[in-house]
């Protein structure tokens, strides 16, 4: 008789989950988002008469995805070190402080917190 290939996950409150899953071809290409629309909107708010080339837009998109991936990876490492199952805003803020220079990290956390506060209360 075949053995069961299920194990208990640490963070799933005792629920069973498979050890290995097949990866679909979507899971590898789905990870990166396209922020072109948002970059254009912010640019038009800041400098209405200016535009941006498609190559520059691609570079900005790559930069944003890279920064997002670095912060997410570092925040997940911090979550794992704290032996927690939930990623909190504190983990994100600490990851930003670890990755970026002091002054830039302070501004990023302040503006990010303000943006979330505005979004929640709108």
Image (tube, rainbow, N blue to C red):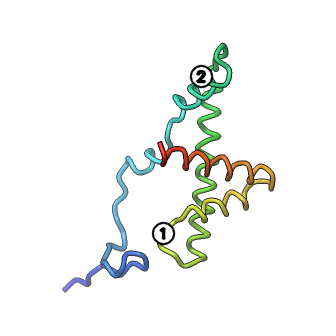
> Label 1, label 2: how many angstroms apart (C-alpha)?
38 Å
The quadrant in which residue 54 appears is: top right
Give SS at disc 2: helix
How far across and how far down the image is residue 64, in percent? Answer: 61, 41
How far across and how far down the image is residue 51, in percent? Answer: 64, 17
Q: Bin the neighbour count of mark 1 within 10 Å (Cα to Cα): few under 14, some 14-19, many 20 and up.
A: few
The correct choice, above or below, for 29 with respect to 38 in the image is: below
How far across and how far down the image is residue 56, in percent? Answer: 65, 26
7 left or right of 110 in image:
left
Q: Which mark is residue 51?
A: none
Instruction: Please state which of residues 106 and 60 is positioned toward the viewer in this rendering.
Output: 106
* Residue that sits furthest to the top in the current view: 49
34 left or right of 26 in image:
right
How far across and how far down the image is residue 79, in percent? Answer: 57, 71
Residue lying at 64% horizontally and 34% vertically, measured from the top left: 60
The residue indicated by pointer 2 is: 54
Instruction: Please state which of residues 84 and 55 is positioned toward the viewer in this rendering.
Output: 84
The correct choice, above or below, for 15 with respect to 71 in the image is: below
**Quarter the N terminus occupies:** bottom left
Instruction: Please state which of residues 74 and 49 is positioned toward the viewer in this rendering.
Output: 49
The residue indicated by pointer 1 is: 86
Decide which of tag 1 and tag 2 comes sooner along the chain. 2
* Residue that sits furthest to the front in the current view: 121
Count of numbered badges drawn on the protein: 2
19 left or right of 83 in image:
left
Residue lying at 67% horizontally and 25% vertically, measured from the top left: 46
Instruction: Please state which of residues 99 and 121 is positioned toward the viewer in this rendering.
Output: 121
* Residue that sits furthest to the left in the current view: 1
Residue lying at 68% horizontally and 51% vertically, measured from the top left: 110
The quadrant in which residue 43 appears is: top right
């Amino acid at each position: 008789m075949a053995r069961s290939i299920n194990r208990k996950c640490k963070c799933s409150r005792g629920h069973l989950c498979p050890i290995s899953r097949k990866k679909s071809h979507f899971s590898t290409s789905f990870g990166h988002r396209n922020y072109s629309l948002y970059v254009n909107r912010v640019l038009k708010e800041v400098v209405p008469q200016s535009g941006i080339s498609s190559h520059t837009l691609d570079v900005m998109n790559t930069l944003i995805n890279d920064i997002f991936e670095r912060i997410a990876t570092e925040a997940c490492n911090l979550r794992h070190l704290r032996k927690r199952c939930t990623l909190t805003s504190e983990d994100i803020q600490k990851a930003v402080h670890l990755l970026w220079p002091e002054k830039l990290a302070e501004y990023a956390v302040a503006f990010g917190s303000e943006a979330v506060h505005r979004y929640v209360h709108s």
